[in-house]
Amino acid sequence: MIWAKEETLPRSEIEAIQLSKLKDTVRYIYDRVKPYRDRMDAAGVKPEDIRTLEDLKKLPYTYKADFKENYPDGLFAVDKKEIVRYHASSGTTGKPTVVGYTRNDLDMWLNNVARIACMGGATAEDVAQISFGYGTFTGALGLHGGLEKIGASVIPMSSGNTNKQIMFLKDMGVTLLVATPSYALHLGEEIRKRGIDPAKDLKLHIGLFGGEGMTEPMRDEMHKVWGEQFVCTQNYGMSELCGPGVAGECTELCGMHVNEDWFIPEIIDPDTEEVLPPGERGELVVTCLGKEALPLVRYRTGDMTRLMYEPCKCGRTTCRMENISGRADDMLVIRGVNVFPTQIEEVLLKIEEIGPHYEILVERKNRLDVMTITVELIDDRLLDSYASLSELEGRIQRALKSQLGLATQIRLVAPNSLKRFEGKAKRVTDLRKDGL
Amino acid sequence: MIRQISVFVENEPGSMLRVTSVLTEAHVNIRAISTFDTPEFGIMRLVVDEPERAKESLTAKGFVTRVNEVIGAELKDEKGNLNQMLKILADGEINVNYIYSFVIREGRAPVIVFHTDDFAKAERVLKAADVKLIEEQEM
């Protein structure tokens, strides 16, 4: 099922919608968001200079750092009383990236998520278990609302507690699972360990995955674990843009369809900041169209991908983006949570007993991401008892958990055992390969 | 009271050797040594003839080290003597955090080293029971 007719329009009509909405959006953001108006003025661009889609290039970029500088809501275009929902995601340091929605924004967002759910094969008949963590993360409530819109029955399970997950999957006749792909693999293996064959004993046949990328080897594993009947697609979004609902794979599995009547994607060279021709790989830049609370123009997502404009067999005419192949910055995705090394650094620098150097190691064990942070012990007072060392370890873990929302492993080493860097430090080692 | 030196070591091959090499180079004599098995890091504790020199040389090589006090009790090398000492401490409701013993003492009686949270009381009850506590110059 295709949710909206806008997904199937001829390219000329998609572009006409984009241009009309772009003009309105630029006028709107110029009038209402001072930081962006200042930037346009500095670049010498006025809203009336936007006459064609090509003119998009004249507009300045928006960066993740703009959210930090204007924390919490300096980029918002409406008064607080117009906001009906806030969400938040990781910031590059202690403060989160806060986003907001007006009533119209919520409606637009959840309709876009409904489109993505339909792309993955969801219908009103489905019983959907949402195994994303709830809270301020956009993923859970986004898929929750989108699936409700198409009439599916939603179980707001949240993440963790494998036994309860499995009980609901079985007893409620769940047909659709929303999770990170790595958690779905973990859950599938736990189910098999309990002697349950998902293909025979469960009704589950659709997986809508997000929060982290799903590689083709992961999709193959998914079929081994959940059975050949399992149709699994991934979708793409980020809280700054609205959350999930920006793009999603259809069951043809040939890239993620971008909801182009709401989002204009561009691909740029992250170093030169120049726009690349269609089909080339580079950093994805997105302009949101028609958002009221938090309009964003030319937002630098940091995600590396390429766009494909050839028509798709599914009948949709919207362009498709390839699997994210990496990041333009040093952001990590750990269990679906975005983590910036600067966030970790900020926590570590506040702990006196350890030195300023650290290393981050990311591995996937038993299908789940494990992050180990190595720090140098510098305070000899902790040697009075092993308990003091353990307490320090626990204290670092708790501080990181509160900052990142993630459990970490801490490795204490002697001073000067970590590598020193002149210039840009390479502190992160990511051993995950193909997401497995 | 005697002093022990505690050194932070990682649980990996050669980590204790690195400590003893530094001490050998510094002409420090090791009298007693202990570690216990912990997953990733541990504390190596030593009683040496010259704790200050040991700390200086280890710190210069980048080790996190600490010198603190422990009790050394000299026991006759006879059955039941350690048991007797532990009973004295238990009766005095003194908690022993960790315990280890001297390596070799050239024909002299063995020394048991232990750490507790209440040194004064431990010394009192042991002395009252005629357990010989040793000082550094007697090592």
Image: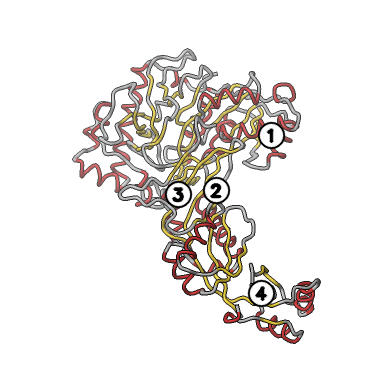
Query: Front-most of A368 and A41?
Result: A368
Q: Does residue A163 appear left or right of residue A302 in this picture?
A: right
The reply to the same-chain question for discs 4 and 3 is no
Kind of residue at disc 4 = Thr
Mark 2 and mark 3 lie on one chain; the one further toward the N terminus is 3
- Secondary structure, mark 3, is strand
Badge number at residue A359:
3
- Label 4 sits on residue: B116
Q: Position of residue A151 (x, y in %)?
A: 61, 28
Spatial separation of the CA atoms under disc 1 and disc 2: 21 Å
Alpha-carbon neighbours of circle 4 within 10 Å: few (<14), some, or many (≥20)? some
Residue A54 is drawn in which quadrant?
top left
> Does residue A20 sit above or below B116 in this rendering?
above
Which mark is nearer the camera, 2 or 3? 3
- Secondary structure, mark 2, is loop
* Residue at the extreme right: B80
- Label 1 sits on residue: A190
- Label 3 resides on the chain identified as A
Q: What residue do we see at 69% from left, 29% from top?
A: A174
- Label 2 sits on residue: A406
Query: Front-most of A105 and A214?
Result: A214
Kind of residue at disc 3 = Glu
Which mark is nearer the camera, 4 or 3? 4
User: Would you say residue A36 is visible in this rendering?
Assistant: yes
